[in-house]
Image (tube, rainbow, N blue to C red):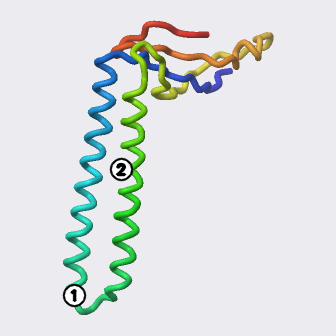
Amino acid sequence: MKIVKKITVKQVVTETSKQRIYQGFYNHKLRLEQECQQLKFEKRKLQHKASVNPQEIEDRFEQEINNRKEKIKLLDFKIEQLNEIQIGSEIIEDEVEALVEVEVGTNWSKLMKEQAIIIKDDKVIRIDE
């Protein structure tokens, strides 16, 4: 019988990976800021229509804008944390699922022991079992 087991993927932080992660955070932050600007524009456009309740529009758009601002704050925090991480540290990047063979007599605790795949600059360098 086969079962699905979750395996942690960790990344060794290098200058290259740190820069790639930073770029991903930065791009996401820019996209959220653009969405805020677009929402503000849409809000002004809708407020000039007579058939809609201005307060309802204000509330709905402000909620959406605030949601994005919270995500921006979280990204700023992640960028700060990224700057603190030492080169050579291992960080959790992902989690994958693996098919594992289970048979009568299989050592269950050994089978369920936490495993990790360690990568460095997109290359697997170690598998911890």
Q: Nearer the viewer, residue 76 or 121?
A: 76
Graded by Cα atoms within 10 Å as few (under 14), some (14 to 19) or many (20 or more), the crowding at tag 1 reads few
Residue 50 position in % (x across, y down): 23, 92
Viewer-nearest of discs 2 and 1:
2
Residue 7 position in % (x across, y down): 56, 22
Residue 31 position in % (x across, y down): 25, 49
Question: What is the secondary structure assignment of the residue under circle 2?
Answer: helix
Dot label at residue 49: 1
Q: Earlier in the sequence, mark 2 or mark 1?
A: 1
Classify residue 50 as left or right of residue 125: left
Residue at 42% over, 18% down = 86
Residue at 76% over, 16% down = 109
Whole-angstrom CA distance, mark 2 to mark 1, is 31 Å
Residue at 48% over, 23% down = 91
Q: Name the amino acid type tagged 2.
A: Ile
The quadrant where residue 52 appears: bottom left
Q: Say if 113 sits above or below 126 in the image.
A: below
Q: Say if 14 sits above or below 76 in the image.
A: above
Q: Quadrant of the N terminus?
A: top right
Badge 2 is on which residue? 72
Extreme residue in the right direction: 105
Residue at 60% over, 16% down = 115
